[in-house]
Amino acid sequence: MAAPATRLTIDQQALLPADAHVDPAACRAALADGGADFLELILAQGLGPLWHHCLQSHGLLDALPGEVTDALRDDRMSAAGGYLAQRAALDRLDRLFETEGIPWLVMKGAHVRECAYPDPALRPAGDIDILIPPADRRRAARALLGAGHAVHADPANISHEATFSHGGVDIDLHWHILRPGRTRLDLTGQLLERRQRVGGQWGPCDSDTLFLMLTHPAFAKYVCSPNMGLGRVADFLLWVQQRPVDWPAVVKRLDAAGLKTAAWTMLSWFRLLAPPALHATLDGWLGSVRPGRLRAAYLRQWLLRDLPGRWLQRPVLIQFGFTLPLHDRPGDALHALRGVRQARRNRRHDLGLLLGEGT
């Protein structure tokens, strides 16, 4: 594994097209200098379509070797095909849930790409994340099963989500954004109340979108581990450069949820990878959600030493040593632990709530 400083430098280079002020010639030079390993990283992180767009829109593709151009073009075409299939699935889901009277929204990458990318097809998404009210989970499941979807209900996550697949498209159906207990209060109702129609689909309002970027990956992807991926970093960078940010509103949501520390940790990681033009803005945001001095120093070491990545195969160490301290207060961490225990006890019950008794 590369040393953290080397990894940061390479990751910063891979994110160059997400900088609104980047010199396209610098992108071409980075791709030429990085060689096959750098190209492989870009493709593996889902950034190939963004690189292709940046270089093509400035007429710089022809300056690269043919195999590089072909790889980027093929990756963009594959992403476009995946996007069309997912948009068709979302259109069907919209009609299905509207007919059933089920409030819903699409969140995370499949929403961000409609708002912050020059072309939404430039942002590949492995699946579509949908949020619905907890009380509607069984009706939603029945509607999806009736429409030909197959269900995969992971017992480890059945407290808050399940996957429905059809025609090569996976829909992650959420009724909580995280395992119950991670937040001080259930946020699903508030997110759905503030939803807005964007690009023909329902999505969170702008402040809620940023709130989700700063909280969900902290627990679900361990901030800077390989599970996080650079595509989510690109989402954040493009969003804050192109969308108006009501930072006080975001802080209010973070404070109510008990997740300011999680947001500070995510922002610290984004700050390490962000272009210089964003540093002053991010520094100001960091100051408004910073935890105590000792905890901030402790969490920063997790980032600088890449401990989530190094200990990825030992998740218990990460969960107790890293994600629990991401809660603002000890009581919030205890609430999260109780949520884990309750989710384990209630797996059969939660499966019944989703798919019916005796499933």
Image: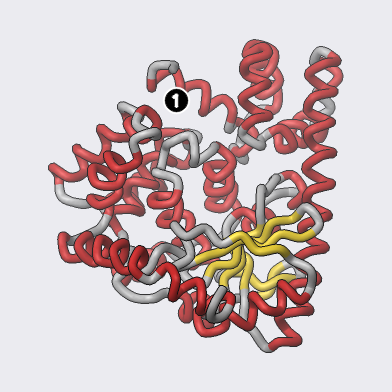
Q: Quadrant of the C terminus?
A: bottom right
- From the image, which quarter does the N terminus lie in? top left
User: Is residue 237 something one can see in this rendering?
Assistant: yes
Q: Is residue 248 visible?
A: no
How far across and down, in percent of the image, does residue 33 sit?
64, 11
- Seen in the picture, residue 237 relative to 263 is either above or below; the reply is above
Q: Residue at x 74, y 55 (%)?
A: 169
Q: Is residue 54 above or below residue 207?
A: above
For numbered disc 1, what is the local secondary structure?
helix
Q: Residue at x 50, y 71 (%)?
A: 351
Compared across the picture, whether 344 is left or right of 299 comes to right
**Residue 290 location, x and y as percent?**
24, 51
Q: Residue furthest front?
A: 358
Number of numbered discs: 1
- Residue 339 point in image, percent of width and height: 30, 66
Image quadrant of residue 2? Answer: top left
Image coords of residue 347 (percent x, y): 42, 67
Q: Residues within 10 Å of mark 1 (few under 14, many from 20)?
A: some
Residue 258 lies, with reference to residue 317, above or below; the image says: below
Left or right: residue 190 versus residue 289 is right
* Left or right: 285 as drawn, with respect to 9: left
Q: How is the image coloured?
A: secondary structure
| Callout 1 amino acid | Leu
- Picture layout, residue 78 above or below residue 168: above
> Is residue 193 left or right of 96 when viewed as pictured?
left
The structure residue drawn at horizontal position 59% and vertical position 28%, both measured from the top left corner, is 14
Q: Which residue is mark 1?
A: 8
Question: Is residue 256 or residue 54 the one in the foreground?
Answer: 256
Q: Residue at x 61, y 34 (%)?
A: 45
